[in-house]
Each structure stands twice: as C-alpha cells, then as structure tokens.
Image (cartoon, helix red, strand yellow):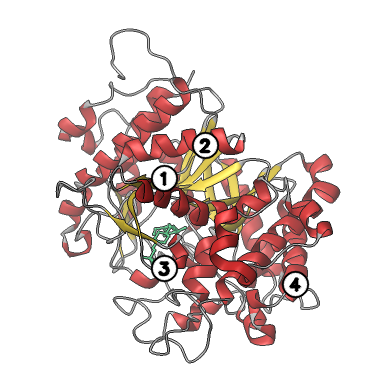
Amino acid sequence: MITSEAPVAKLPKDFIWGFATASFQVEGSLDVDGRGKSFWDDFSHIPGKTLDGGNGDVATDSYRLYKEDIALLKSYGVKSYRFSIAWSRIIPLGGRNDPINQKGIEWYSNFIDELLKNGIQPFVTLYHWDLPQGLHDRYGGWLNKEIVLDYQHYARVCFQAFGDRVKNWLTMNEPWCISILGYGRGVFAPGRSSDRNRSPEGDSSTEPWIVGHHVILSHAYAVKIYREEFKVAQGGQIGVTLNGDWAVPYDDKPENIEAAQHALDVAIGELDPIYLGHYPPYMRTMLGDRLPTFSDEELAVVKGSSDFYGMNTYTTNLCKAGGDDEFQGCVEYTFTRPDGTQLGTQAHCAWLQTYPQGFRDLMNYLWKRYQKPIYVTENGFAVKDEHNMTIDQALQDYDRVEYFRGMTAAIYGAILEDEVPVRAYFPWSLLDNFEWADGYETRFGVTYVDYATQKRYPKESAKFLVKFFAENIESSEPKLPPVGQVIENNKLAHGQGFGGGVSALVESVSA
Ligand code: GBH
C-alpha cells in the first residue's frame, strides 16, 4: 500500500512521533541528589521478585547519561520524547507537607531544556509506577484516599516547575497495571495479593478496585488543578493513558463473542468513568459492591477529565468465555486459533504476539466509542531470547522490524483510510531497560544497551522507524531511500542514508 511510484498520502504535518521510557526503568542513581525511595527500590531487591534478580540501581544509567540519550533521540529525528518524572525525586517522602527537593526539580528542568534545545517536545508522565516509599509506609499508598491530596500536590509542583515548557501531560501510566499487578496478582510493587505464597498481606478481591478508584480520583483532581490554575497561562493539554490490548472472539460461539467484549470492558472500560461517566455495567455485575462508587461531586470532576484518549497497546488476545480471572473479565486468553495456528510471531514474553490488524481494529473501536483523538503512548516488541545473543545478532532484530512494519501500516491505514484521528505514536522503548518483574532479561529497546559498558547501539528496528517517519509525515524532508530498502540492504545499517546520524552517534557513544 505504500509504494514509491505515485504520490502517496502522508500522515499530517503535526503528527507526533517519538520514543517512550519511564523513570525507574532507565534512571538509576537512586540515592543521588536527594531522591527518596520509591516502592520499587526495595521490592526489586527482594529475591524472586525479578526474573534475573535485576534491580533499578543503575538501569541504563540515564540520570547521568541524559545528554547522550537526548543526542540519540536527536539522531533518530523524533519530534517528541515521552519520559516520566520520579515523584520521589521531587518530593522525597511524597506528601503534601513534606519538603520539596530543589535538586530533583533542577535535574528535570535541565533535562527538559536539553530536549527543547534539540528540538524535541517533552511528553511527560507524572506517575509511571514508582510511588514514594514514604507514602506506602505512612498510610498504605494507593489503598488510602489520602493519596488523592498528595498526588494533587505533587502534580501542582510539577505544573509550576515545568509547565512553562511542557505542553503535554499524562497523569498516570496504565491504572490497570498499578492496581491489578501491584495489589491483585502481586507481581509488581508493592506485591500485595491474596496468594500467601506471594505476600503475607493483601486481598486480591477488593484492593485492586479500591486502588484503581483512587488512581482515577487522583488523576481527575490533578487535571482539575491543571485546567483551573495552569492551562490558560501555559496552554498545554493533559490526559491519562491506559493499557488495552484488542480482543477477538476465539470462534463464533455467542459466549465467546460476548467474552471478547467482557475482556475489553475490564481492560479498557476500567477508565470509562473518565470518558463516559460510569463503569461498564459488566464490571458492576462482576464485582458488585466490591467496585467503589463515586459521589456526585467526584463524578463531576472525573467525567471528561482527559483531553485525549491515551493508549498503550501491544497485542491482541483471542478470548474464550470461562475461568474466574476477574482481572481479565473472567475470560481466558490464548494466541492459538481453533485450527492450531498462532495469531502472530511470539515475543520473548508469553503475553505478546504480533497482530497489526488488531491494533487497527482497536483504534477504530476507540474512536467510535470515545470520540476523542487518540495518542498511542506505547507500542513495542521484545525479540525472543535477545538477551542470549551477541550484540551483532541482537541488532538484527527482524521480528521487531516486522512488528513495527505492521503497526506503522496499521496507523497509516487507520488515519488515512479509516479517518481515525490518531495524533501520536511512541514506540516502546528508546532503550533496552529495566523491564520490571522481568528484570533485564526481556529487551524492548529499539536501541541495544550493553549493560556492562552502558554503550548504546541502534537496532534495525530503530532504523526502520526513523526511515518510516522521515518519509511518511507531510512536509518532512524525504532524506532517505524508499521504505523497504533499509532492511534488505544491510549496507544502510552502516551509515548510508542517515547523513551519518545514527552510525556517527554509535561511534561517538561507543568511543
Ligand atoms: C507497558 O505495559 C509498561 O508501561 C512499560 O513500563 C513496560 O516496560 C512495557 O509495557 C513492556 O512490558 O502476564 O498478567 O502479568 C504494557 C502492558 C500489561 C503488558 C500487563 C504485560 C502482563 C500481564 N502490560 N501484561 S500478566
């Protein structure tokens, strides 16, 4: 569909693309410049909590190497960079009456200035899973409604300090993961769960829904502050982003068709109060009184509290009715079709296969249902066994290239053929990094990180994306050969067609 012959339609000039990361996954320097602990600091040190025993102490060392990271972004020609702020660098103990850490503010301020100096727009997440340990210790963190007030305060400090330069804000990354992986399955910090082999405390039947409710309220009240106190002067926009994978019925059985909708009702519908003003009826039926309710006053703040539809999406699940896993709507997921074939290419992690058509269907579904411009704030792939490869092998990441080839075609089709207003695309991730419970074993980067040296090496997938967006956004200069050649022609990997950008940078970073 994208050929080099006829003049082809392009993505609109203001289409935003860039790469995404999160503070705890890349920064390291946990005890530097007055940072307080987050609840991932100690959690990642507990034996058994990460696959390979990895922790966040160094990660990709990006707190120290931030100028190199920004030079890398610049060499990729991105318009924007999505990163998150570590709450405990800004307010080490987290609370509204606790001291503010000027050194933390200074660091992010310098970081933002460096991005802008290089022509890269900051796209800032306020909370990507690293709760100040102080708030967890003080009152149970997200389990306590106190957090709504502390989060508002933290958000206000950030708007004040950075809002003159930051025009795109995300309040929360993936409420489903915060609540269900942290307080239900117990695989993420703080690791609470009813499973006593996993955690001495926790109640998976109630806590995730309480946490989710407080996350929504914290988001909504922070947005209220932004709109009332900052938006007019600063002129930015603010929203939330969630994780939603597309759901396809396993077969034509009516109960499986229904199951696919139930899966979406829980994965995506969890934030319906924000967009539609109520939880999906199916969540209410499934959870009864365990699903908290909003007061009228709260609901007035919650409803309409996102300026856009923020979306992280990775895969598609085939859905079968059955099972009692409430966290996925009492639906069973599989990638194996009834005829035994696989949905797509298997990634390193069990939950991820490539299925671009699902991405396109999801964008259409979201637009029809929510009528908000869509910002795809994460999308990415981890190549199977990449951690066991030599660097040279890992750089030839053709399964990831295939993934992004499909996903960029899906975006292109959604915008230009289906007329869905998708405004932004942030592949995950700029770098291989600390992959939470997977430690460093699972690599999502388009840039290889050699953890022994912290040197960065662009993979083929980075080159593919750079080229795709250089050629397919309106009025961006087509500096590069037509799509399709980069992968066939290995020579391009060594400098041609990039004005020396990528390879020059590899050399300078590696030097
Ligand atoms: C994103 O979440 C995160 O925002 C990002 O920090 C992370 O690095 C990236 O994914 C890659 O994983 O098997 O039950 O534990 C993506 C959404 C939802 C995908 C939970 C993995 C695992 C479900 N994630 N899912 S389970």
Q: Quadrant of the N terminus?
A: top left
Which quadrant of the render holds ligand 1?
bottom left
Secondary structure of the residue carrying numbered label 1:
loop
Q: Is residue 143 above or below residue 402?
A: below
Mark found first going from the N terminus, 4 or 2: 4
Secondary structure of the residue carrying numbered label 2:
strand
Secondary structure of the residue carrying numbered label 4:
loop
Instruction: Give the residue type that dot 2 points to.
Output: Ala
Gap between marks 3 and 2, in whole Å?
33 Å
Instruction: Give the residue type that dot 3 points to.
Output: Asp
- Residue holding disc 4: 100
- Residue holding disc 3: 325
In the image, taking residue 250 as reference, residue 30 lies left or right, namely right
Q: Are marks 4 and 2 in contact (CB under 8 Å)?
A: no
Gap between marks 4 and 3, in whole Å?
41 Å
Position of residue 423 measured from the top left corner of the image (x, y, whole percent): 54, 33
Gap between marks 1 and 2, in whole Å?
10 Å
Q: Are marks 3 and 2 in contact (CB under 8 Å)?
A: no
- Residue holding disc 2: 424
Kindly report which numbered mark, 3 or 2, lies closer to the viewer in this rendering.
3
Instruction: Give the residue type that dot 1 points to.
Output: Pro
Position of residue 257 measured from the top left corner of the image (x, y, whole percent): 38, 45
Instruction: Give the residue type that dot 4 points to.
Output: Ile
Mark found first going from the N terminus, 4 or 3: 4
Mark found first going from the N terminus, 3 or 2: 3
Q: Are marks 4 and 1 in contact (CB under 8 Å)?
A: no
Q: Quadrant of the C terminus?
A: bottom left
Please tell me which residue lies in front, 136 or 291: 291
Residue sitting farthest toward the top: 6
In the image, taking residue 491 as reference, residue 90 lies left or right, namely right
The disc placed on residue 427 is 1
